[in-house]
Amino acid sequence: MTPDQARKLVLEKPTGQVDGLSTGFSDGPVGAISTAVHFWEEYAFLDDRKARQQLEAIVSPDTAGYVDEQVSEVRKLRGNAGLPPSGGTPAGITFSTTVNAVRATSLTGTEGKVVQVWMNYDRYATQADGSPDDEPLKGEATDLLLKWQGGAWKITNEPEYREKRSFPRAYFPDSHVSWADGWQQVRHAD
């Protein structure tokens, strides 16, 4: 079996939008995965103000300093791209992120209230004239730690959970090793 041969994991549909993020996912594992995927596909990774708004909406109050750390990363990325450290996405350029596959594991045993979600994703840019990105990011990987708190999944980086993180084998859609490691392809609900 490979991730490409297996049935796709169907993400939950969000029931609402708050601060630029999809909301309303269940407290189960598919809800955690759906939260992570929607967040990563909606995240304003190049707009420091919008990123702060989104992060403040989804980051656990138990995670001191995380919002500032992530906004600092956005500003570094802006600087590396030759943009001013603060501001929005350059006019006329749009970005889209597509999560291809996930690998989710519980960090709290069968209780499942803290989950690590690894995501394999592609990110594309479209120029102001409509021309496609010559060098899209493909096959990138990142992970989020999510904690069920106050009726929603919240991002956390609390040390007690960070030290329980695991690191996956590389994701390849046609790999038996990727399947055995827990990677699943995702599909958005219709």
Image (cartoon, grey):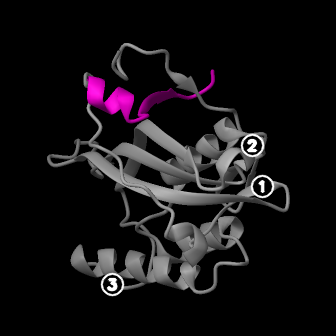
Q: Which residue is mark 1?
A: 152
Q: Quadrant of residue 120?
A: top left
Instruction: Tell me, for residue 16, which label it has, or none.
Output: none
Residue 173's x, y, as percent?
Answer: 29, 26
Magenta residues, as a range? 176-190
Nearer the observer, 88 or 164: 164
73 w.r.t. 143: above or below: below
CA neighbours of label 3 inside 10 A, class few (<14), some (14 to 19), many (20+): few
Within the image, what quadrant is residue 160 found in? bottom right
- Give the residue at mark 3: 84
Are the residues flagged by discs 1 and 2 in contact, CB closer than 8 Å?
A: yes
- At x 23%, y 73%, the residue is 81
Q: Could you say which disc has been placed on residue 25 in the image?
A: 2
Q: Residue at point 28% right, 30% down?
A: 177
Which is more toward the observer, 92 or 6? 6
Q: In front: mark 1 or mark 3?
A: 1
Q: Residue at coordinates 44% horizontally, 78% vertically from top-left?
A: 87
Q: Secondary structure at mark 2?
A: loop
Tell me the CA gap for discs 1 and 2.
7 Å
